């Protein structure tokens, strides 16, 4: 059985004070059995205080991006050793906003994912198609290209250490949500593609859905056989809403 993951991607939201307020309200609501796994992805400035508040508890902390090099002349970037020093345990890579707004390429991700794994960070690799690509029936081709390229230098036996988040770009921040059937179809395609590399690892890889996940639709989305949780954006900014999504995942 794959343990579900609920990851809260706060994007460029929450000061340190706001992050502390959120966690003080959210942490007491967590299930006692520690399932599903919960990951908080705050902005860089809030990483250290969030790690401190979550220390000793079931919640893990992930960054929203990292550079593949350990150090160097890369103004504005943050490396894996810097994240590890803070107690960070994972990192989101390839989010659609990073790809679209900041020009992040599959070639860059092919370097970042192995670098995260080598450092001991759990990568949450985001893949997904935009509205034009879906309308042109290119979803399978886009997902195949991204999975193949971004994981090209990850050995088959290490694939299970990567979390994959399927995020249809047309459903992020738009209020539109992929149907449960669409989410399952994409997740199954991703797992099938991974199985071509290593069938055993593919069965253990956790695949999340991301795209306008809300308390009202979380349970149905995560009921799909290949869905192992969610990468939650806007609904993760309110402690009550994110707690409801966590409870929905725990009931499946």
Image: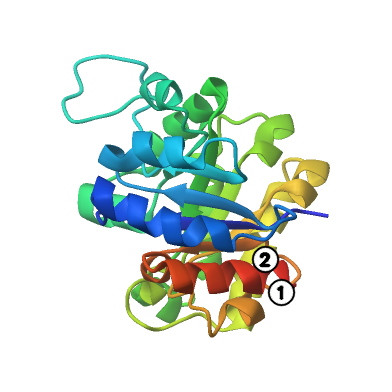
Q: Which mark is residue 171?
A: none
- The residue at the point 35 percent across, 50 percent down is 20
Q: Quadrant of the N terminus?
A: bottom right
Q: Quadrant of the C terminus?
A: bottom right
Task: Give the structural element (helix, strand or loop) at label 1.
Answer: loop
- The residue at the point 36 percent across, 22 percent down is 82
Looking at the image, how many numbered discs can be counted on the residues? 2
Q: In front: 33, or 74?
A: 33
Task: Give the structural element (helix, strand or loop) at label 2.
Answer: loop
Which residue does the numbered mark 1 point to in the structure image?
Answer: 224
Kindly tell me whether residue 104 is visible in this rendering: yes
- The residue at the point 43 percent across, 55 percent down is 24
Q: Are marks 1 and 2 in contact (CB under 8 Å)?
A: yes
Which residue does the numbered mark 2 point to in the structure image?
Answer: 227
Q: Position of residue 99 (x, y in %)?
A: 31, 51
Above or below, comparing residue 76 to residue 27 in the picture: above
Q: Position of residue 199 (x, y in %)?
A: 81, 46
- The residue at the point 46 percent across, 74 percent down is 241
Horizontal arrangement in the rendering, residue 217 relative to residue 136 (left or right): right
């Amino acid at each position: 059985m794959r343990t579900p993951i609920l990851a809260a991607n706060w994007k460029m939201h929450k000061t340190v004070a706001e992050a502390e307020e959120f966690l003080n309200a959210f942490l007491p609501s967590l299930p006692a059995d520690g399932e599903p796994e919960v990951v908080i992805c705050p902005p860089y400035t809030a990483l250290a205080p969030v790690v401190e508040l979550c220390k000793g508890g079931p919640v893990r902390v992930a960054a929203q991006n990292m550079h593949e090099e350990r150090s160097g002349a890369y103004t504005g970037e943050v490396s894996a050793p810097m994240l590890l020093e803070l107690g960070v345990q994972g990192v989101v890579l390839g989010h659609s906003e990073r790809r679209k707004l900041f020009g992040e390429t599959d070639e860059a991700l092919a370097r970042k994912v192995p670098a995260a794994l080598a450092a001991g960070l759990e990568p949450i690799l985001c893949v997904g198609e935009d509205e034009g690509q879906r309308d042109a029936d290119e979803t399978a081709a886009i997902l195949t290209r991204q999975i193949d390229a971004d994981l090209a230098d990850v050995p088959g036996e290490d694939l299970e250490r990567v979390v994959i988040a399927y995020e249809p770009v047309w459903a992020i921040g738009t209020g539109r949500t992929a149907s449960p059937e669409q989410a399952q179809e994409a997740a199954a395609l991703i797992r099938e593609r991974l199985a071509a590399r290593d069938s055993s690892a593919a069965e253990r890889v956790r695949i999340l859905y991301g795209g306008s996940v809300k308390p009202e639709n979380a349970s149905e989305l995560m009921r799909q056989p290949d869905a192992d949780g969610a990468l939650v954006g806007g609904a993760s900014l309110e402690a009550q809403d994110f707690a409801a999504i966590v409870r929905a995942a725990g009931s499946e």
